Each structure stands twice: as structure tokens, then as C-alpha cells.
Amino acid sequence: MAQSFEQWSEDVSTAFVPLDAVPTGLSQFDGGLSSAELGSLHISEVSGRDVDVRRTRATIRRSDPGLVKVGVQLRGRGVVVQRDRQAVLMPGDFAVYDTSEPYTLHFDDDFAMFVLMFPRESLSIRPNDLAHVLALRIQGDDGVGSLVSPFLFNLRKYLTDGIFPATRMFENAILDLVSAALDERAPHAIQSPGAVILAGAQSFIDSNLHDPALNTAMVAAARHISPRYLQKVFEAEGRGVAAWIRSRRLECCRRDLEDPRLSHESIGTICARYGLGNSAHFSRVFKEAYGVSPRHARAPGRA
């Protein structure tokens, strides 16, 4: 029993982010885990019984890659707790939680959960909106959730078959659907001038990542505001203009590196496409952001 649970606990912690798992029942533990990667998406199905899984401040200090997880309840009952909120999930329901903050998953009896894990920046919603929907139950039979839940549920078959559609469009479609479900539940006040400026600036940045000269001054000029005010608008969302530009460039490079259809392109060609002409500098900042080198990121069948 102890070895079975310890192995499961170690596998779960390795597959996701460092976690602490604690058995809560007296019966024999029986669990399983299967995982695969689709571009920047890490896809898993995890099962077990009578267990609490905790992301603590201590485990966050061990590793904090800035990832978000979406848990879809497949079997049994699950509870996601984060930011003093609690989402009670029944089969078909799902919730999002942030690995950079403490959370607890509580499972009574036998359960199975399908989990998507991806960089926080991949979502098409504002950070403040994401904060409002953490650990919020999204029903699988209501609103946009009724479209997203069956889609995510059916992704499981790719884990079984071991064959994933190798296209960026498919990966983007998953992220867009998840973003739409979260956006529907986010509280939308009348947009402030700062929010409008931020959205316009981010759109300009995404359209000009190819330009090596892209910087705060260029974006500010395009939006007819001062660089200082633009920086203030971005910092209100937790990240400056230069940091946002770099994160978008790195994320685009990562997706292209992991796209099998672009395997014939050199790493230099890909990073130059997004305005990063210095390959050595690109390799260094890429590894700092993702923990692996660009060469390893595009290796087939990497763990």
C-alpha cells in the first residue's frame, strides 16, 4: 500500500509541479496517471481514491514555472480550493487554478480527473479576470461550459490512442475555448481607459513581434500616449512593457519549436521571425523561462 501510494505521489509531482499528497482513507490505495504533450499543453488523466493533493508555499519555492491548470472531473467528486474559494466538482464540471499560488485538491472515494496545464500567458483573458475565476466551478451543462466540457472530455481519447493532431491551430482552439469559458464567468465592469489602452497595446505588440526595434517607445507612439503612462498601465497588470514583449516572443518561439511541421526550420530562423536575432541570447532567456534549451524543447518525444 505505502509503495503504491508513494509511487503515485512521486509520479504526480513529477508530471505537474512539486506537490504534497496525503492519503485520507483507510482502504487500499489504487491510482494511475497517464500524460502527453501537445505543444505548450501538458495533458494528463489522473485517478485515485481518498487523497488530498496540496500545492504549498514550500513546493512553490521549489519550482514556479508560471503555469495554470484546468481540472475536468471525470469520475467521483472533487473539490478545488484556492484564494479562500471552493469549487465542488461533479463529473463534467471543471475549474481553473494557478500553480503560482497555494491550492488544495480534495478527493473522497474513487475519482478520475482530466488535467490541462499550460503557461498562464496562453490564456486570452486579462490577469485580473483570471484571478476572479480561480477555484470557481464551471458547470459542464451550462453556458459556454456546456460546449467546452464535452470537448475536453473527448481529448482523453488522444491519451489512449497516443496520437495528437500536430497543429498549432488545434492547440490554439483548446486554449481559446478554455479562455471563452473563463471569460464568461469573469466579472466585467465597464472598461476603464487603462484597460482599453492595454488591450490596444497588446494587440499592437502581437502584430509587430517580428520587428527587432519593438520597444516601449514604439508601442506608446502607436497608441498616442507617453511611454511612462504606458508602462504604468502594464505594471498595473503585474508586468512591464518590455517583459510582456519578451514573454510573447518566447511563447511564440516555443510554439513554433514544438510544431512538427516546422521541424525543418533552424532555431535561428524561428527566433528571428519574432525579432530575436541573437541566438545565444535567445537560448539563454528561453531556458530561464521554460527550464529547457530551445534544442530540447523541439526534441521529439521529450518527457
Image (spheres, rainbow, N blue to C red):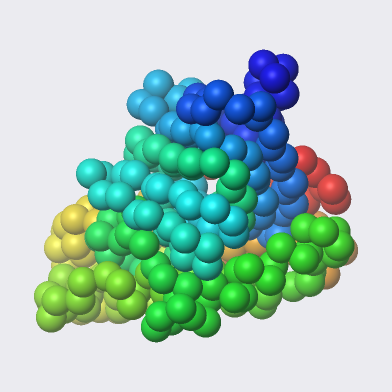
Is any atom of residue 242 visible in this view?
A: no
Above or below 58: residue 293 = below
Residue at image location 72% in from the left, 23% down from the top: 4
Horizontal side, residue 189 vs residue 210: left or right: left
- Name the quadrant of the N terminus: top right
Above or below 55: residue 6 = above
Above or below 30: residue 262 = below
Horizontal side, residue 156 vs residue 191: left or right: right
Q: Residue furthest top?
A: 2
To which quarter of the image does residue 125 belong? bottom left
To which quarter of the image does residue 116 belong? bottom right
Is any atom of residue 27 visible in this view?
A: yes
To which quarter of the image does residue 296 belong? top right
Q: How many marks?
A: 0
Residue 97 or residue 31, whichever sits in front: 31
Q: Position of residue 13 (x, y in %)?
A: 60, 31
Residue at image location 27% in from the left, 70% down from the top: 186
Q: Position of residue 159 (x, y in %)?
A: 78, 58
Residue at image location 61% in from the left, 75% down from the top: 151
Horizontal side, residue 276 vs residue 205: left or right: right
Residue at image location 69% in from the left, 34% down from the top: 30
- Name the quadrant of the C terminus: top right
Q: Position of residue 6 (x, y in %)?
A: 66, 21
